[in-house]
């Protein structure tokens, strides 16, 4: 199998970097479409438009309705075509950014991604996760190239709810755990080949950074201040995790996350990263690890107020039949779990209940 490594053309991170957006998009054209949801327009969307205007770049403002669905992608793509946009700017969270990438692909336009939270590793990748209008996972959509520009303003990130930062830490923590399982199994990455040495190193460095600076960054986010620790974690959550998952490989943790979309109820009030946190523990339960190894991740997640039990993810009363729905969805043909394991849905069900029990036992032992 060929080794493949892919990445965005440019990544820029720092305090108040939105103020410099015009200089970074220079040469891409003079007509943009800027999309953000209602909340994000007030947080950063209007500022982006104003800074583009200072650079004599026009913007069509579009309200993103909240779901990265085919219908929403088609709606915004038509608006972008009508305005003759050559640059698609997505401002906000993972679903907004995934939709922006899809719209840019429809138009063969430049893609500019501006995350307003370090809550997931979607910004850098050449793929989108597509959902139904009801929020049920449908498919991955792959593109021929990664975004042209990722602009991460750490002042904006620092002002986001701290929960979003820890969600990003949880999502990023899955990076090395999944990549190493794909490497061991000889699976294929999201980039379409075997893992490179570079991707392996990035994924491993991602985890190292999270353990070193995660707690300090969490406290920085609570104070809404930009610190070196916050800068490190924003980069780990966004760039290291983004490159690490895409060119390193996805395994069971994200497949379990996708499986959870098969259920109805309060679980859907959790963030992407919070569900991935539990999925990561399930992957560890599927693998051969000593108690100390699993407890290292359990302790870290709990210290960041992340969910580790079925009760924590609003599935306290879930039956085996309920969990089988998750497992079947997580093991459908083409799911990433098959890049890391020879696995059955029944084994996944057992691992989900095992992960829940491991976490409950750890909490009891620590008197939490």
Image (cartoon, rainbow, N blue to C red):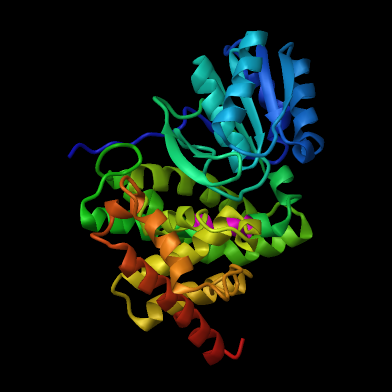
Q: Residue furthest left?
A: 1
Q: Which residues are magenta?
A: 165-172
Q: What x and y, as percent, mark residue 52?
A: 73, 19
Number of marks drawn:
0
Q: Residue furthest right?
A: 42
In the rendered view, tell whether residue 189 sits above or below residue 143: below
Question: Residue 185: horizontal and vertical position, in percent?
Answer: 22, 56
Q: Which residue sits at x=53%, y=15%?
A: 107
- Can residue 168 be seen by looking at this rendering? no
Residue 223 percent across, percent down from the top left: 78, 60
Q: Main secondary structure of the magenta part?
A: helix
Quarter of the image with the C terminus is: bottom right
Asked if residue 358 is among those painted magenta in the image, a careful observer would answer no
Q: Nearer the viewer, residue 316 or 110?
A: 316
Residue 219 in view (yes/no): yes
Does 180 appear above or below 312? above
x and y, in percent, of residue 206 in the image: 45, 55
Q: Is residue 81 above or below residue 217?
A: above
Which residue corresponds to the image point at 47% horizontal and 72% vertical from the top-left?
A: 297
Using the image, determine if residue 8 lies above or below residue 298: above
Q: Quadrant of the N terminus?
A: top left
Image position of 33 (left or right of 290): right
In depth, the one of 13 and 90 nearer the eye is 90
């Amino acid at each position: 199998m060929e080794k493949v490594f892919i990445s965005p053309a440019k990544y820029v991170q720092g305090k108040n970097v939105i103020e410099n957006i015009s200089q970074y998009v220079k040469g891409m054209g003079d007509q943009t479409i800027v999309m953000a949801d209602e909340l994000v327009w007030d947080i950063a969307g209007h500022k982006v438009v104003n800074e583009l205007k200072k650079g004599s770049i026009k913007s069509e403002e579009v309200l993103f309705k909240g779901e990265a669905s085919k219908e929403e992608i088609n709606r915004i793509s038509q608006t972008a075509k009508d305005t003759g946009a050559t640059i698609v700017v997505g401002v906000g969270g993972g679903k907004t950014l995934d939709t922006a990438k899809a719209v840019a692909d429809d138009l063969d336009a430049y893609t500019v991604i501006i995350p307003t939270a370090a809550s997931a590793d979607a910004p850098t990748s050449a793929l989108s996760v597509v959902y139904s209008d009801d929020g049920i996972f449908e498919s991955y959509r792959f593109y021929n190239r990664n975004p042209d520009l990722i602009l991460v303003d750490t002042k904006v990130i620092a002002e986001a709810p701290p929960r979003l930062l820890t969600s990003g830490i949880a999502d990023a923590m899955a990076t090395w755990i999944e990549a190493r399982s794909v490497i061991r199994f000889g699976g294929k990455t999201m980039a379409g080949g075997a893992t490179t040495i570079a991707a392996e190193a990035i994924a491993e460095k991602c985890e190292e950074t999270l353990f070193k600076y995660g707690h300090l960054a969490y406290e920085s986010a609570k104070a809404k201040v930009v610190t070196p620790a916050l800068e490190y974690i924003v980069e780990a959550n966004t760039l290291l995790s983004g490159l690490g998952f895409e060119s390193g490989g996805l395994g069971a943790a994200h497949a379990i996350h996708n499986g959870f979309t098969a259920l109805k109820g309060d679980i859907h009030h959790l963030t992407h990263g919070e569900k991935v946190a539990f999925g990561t523990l399930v992957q560890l339960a599927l693998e051969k690890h000593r108690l100390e190894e699993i407890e290292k991740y359990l302790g870290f997640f709990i210290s960041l107020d992340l969910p580790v039990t079925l009760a924590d993810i609003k599935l306290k009363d879930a039956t085996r039949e309920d969990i089988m729905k998750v497992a079947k969805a997580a093991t459908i043909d083409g799911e990433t779990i098959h890049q890391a394991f020879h696995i059955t849905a029944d084994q996944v069900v057992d691992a989900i209940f095992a992960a829940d029990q491991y976490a409950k036992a750890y909490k009891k032992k620590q008197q939490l």
